[in-house]
């Protein structure tokens, strides 16, 4: 099972929209998807039409359980109205979790442990993070095979990105085994505006190695999709916003195929290999290997 955390220390940059839209695409590809709302504001929970009051157990229960077992974790998972799409909902009480867990050793790995128990039930887990650095975000980052950092293409968000990248460095220092693979996703991009173009130039100049090669454009349908309680893929999969997220799904799976082959399920890998673009990437790989071999075999 792949685990992607969608994180940024800046609010309103498109984290929840990214989780809902990617979940919509994975679900459409018949993959089994678990989404986890770790934001006490519960935006993702309401995006999918849920209200905590109608749910038995939430993420708060998972974090405060005496013992994590398969059945206990399963009891915190709710089916959505959409096939193959399950959710662990958030609640306001999650805001107290930092205080509740503080000082205890190993609390940063609770989510990693919980997800490892259900990893055979899903192809991918997508985690929506709150915009603050605390136990909830650390748990999400540590549990992930990849981290997506949505960054709105405007000046203030670039500042937020700096903070996030610093956090990655601190985590690596705290735990050398901590495997941080992150991709910056430019969001709400509008090529007609100078602010968008200048921000993208800045991202290319400073973060090229971790920058997704494409962008998520501004699309008013995102607002409508959250109002109607369904991912944009179910509203209009052909619109440019939805298509951009499809490209993100394929590109990011391509990265996972290279970096985390052991975690990608055959069903998820099949999506990449069926794409014409991946044939191109594969031939790039073959060239690379051929170069290496050429050097090895030289007299
Ligand atoms: N590509 C886009 N084009 C137009 N509007 C967008 C786009 N992406 C997100 N939005 C809108 O921007 C607002 C903020 O998006 P979203 O809630 O996904 O951000 P967030 O990072 O999760 O925010 P928070 O930090 O508050 O949780 C929402 O109203 C959403 O509908
Ligand atoms: Mg959000």
Image (cartoon, helix red, strand yellow):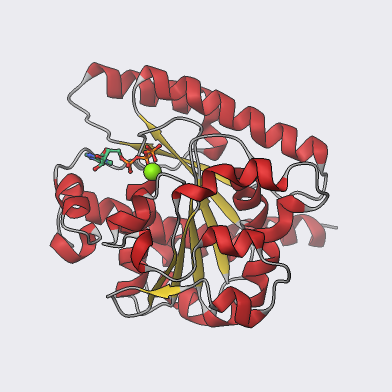
Q: Which quadrant of the view contains residue 298?
A: bottom right
- Which residue: 45% across, 23% down? 158
In screen coordinates, is 151 left or right of 75? left
Q: Quadrant of the N terminus?
A: bottom right
Instruction: Find residue 16 and report its horizontal and vertical position in percent.
Output: 37, 48
Q: Is residue 262 visible?
A: no
Q: Give the answer, above or below, for where 34 lies relative to 148.
A: below
Instruction: Find residue 209 and report its horizontal and vertical position in percent.
Output: 56, 37
- Which residue: 28% across, 51% down? 244
- Which residue: 49% across, 25% down? 160
Q: Which quadrant of the view contains residue 23?
A: bottom left
- Using the image as rendered, state which of residue 185 and residue 255 is in the foreground: 185
- Using the image as rendered, state which of residue 168 and residue 55 is in the foreground: 55
In screen coordinates, is 202 left or right of 63? left
- Using the image as rendered, state which of residue 156 and residue 210 is in the foreground: 156
Q: Give the answer, above or below, for where 225 lies relative to 82.
A: above
- Which residue: 32% across, 60% down? 51
Instruction: Find residue 132 and report its horizontal and vertical position in percent.
Output: 54, 34
Instruction: Find residue 220 and report its horizontal and vertical position in percent.
Output: 14, 42
In screen coordinates, is 264 left or right of 154? right
Q: Quadrant of the C terminus?
A: bottom right
- Using the image as rendered, state which of residue 104 and residue 154 is in the foreground: 104
Q: Is residue 73 visible?
A: yes
């Amino acid at each position: 099972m792949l685990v992607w955390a969608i994180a940024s220390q800046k609010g309103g940059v498109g984290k929840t929209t990214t989780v809902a839209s990617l979940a919509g695409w994975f679900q459409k590809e018949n993959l089994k998807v678990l989404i986890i709302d770790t934001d006490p504001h519960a935006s993702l929970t309401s995006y999918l039409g849920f209200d905590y009051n109608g749910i038995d157990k939430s993420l708060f229960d998972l974090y405060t359980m005496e013992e994590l077992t398969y059945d206990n974790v399963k009891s915190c998972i709710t089916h959505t109205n959409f096939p193959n799409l399950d959710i662990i909902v958030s609640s306001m009480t999650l805001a107290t979790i930092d205080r509740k867990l503080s000082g205890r050793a190993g609390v940063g790995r609770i989510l990693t442990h919980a997800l490892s128990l259900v990893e055979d039930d899903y192809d991918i887990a997508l985690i929506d993070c709150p915009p603050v650095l605390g136990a909830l975000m650390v748990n999400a980052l540590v549990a992930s095979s990849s981290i997506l950092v949505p960054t709105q293409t405007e000046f203030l968000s670039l500042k937020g990105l700096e903070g996030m990248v610093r956090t990655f460095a601190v985590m690596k220092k705290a735990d050398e085994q901590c495997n941080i693979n992150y991709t910056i996703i430019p969001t709400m991009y509008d090529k007609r505006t100078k602010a968008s173009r200048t921000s993208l130039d800045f991202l290319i100049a400073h973060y090229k190695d971790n920058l997704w090669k494409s962008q998520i454009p501004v699309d008013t349908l995102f607002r409508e999709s959250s109002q109607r309680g369904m991912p944009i893929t179910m509203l209009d999969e052909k619109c440019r916003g939805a298509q951009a997220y499809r490209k993100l799904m394929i590109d990011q799976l391509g990265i996972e195929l290279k970096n985390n082959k052991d975690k990608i399920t055959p069903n998820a890998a099949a999506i990449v290999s069926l794409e014409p673009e991946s044939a191109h990437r594969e031939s790039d790989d073959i060239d690379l290997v051929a170069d290496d071999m050429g050097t090895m075999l030289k007299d």
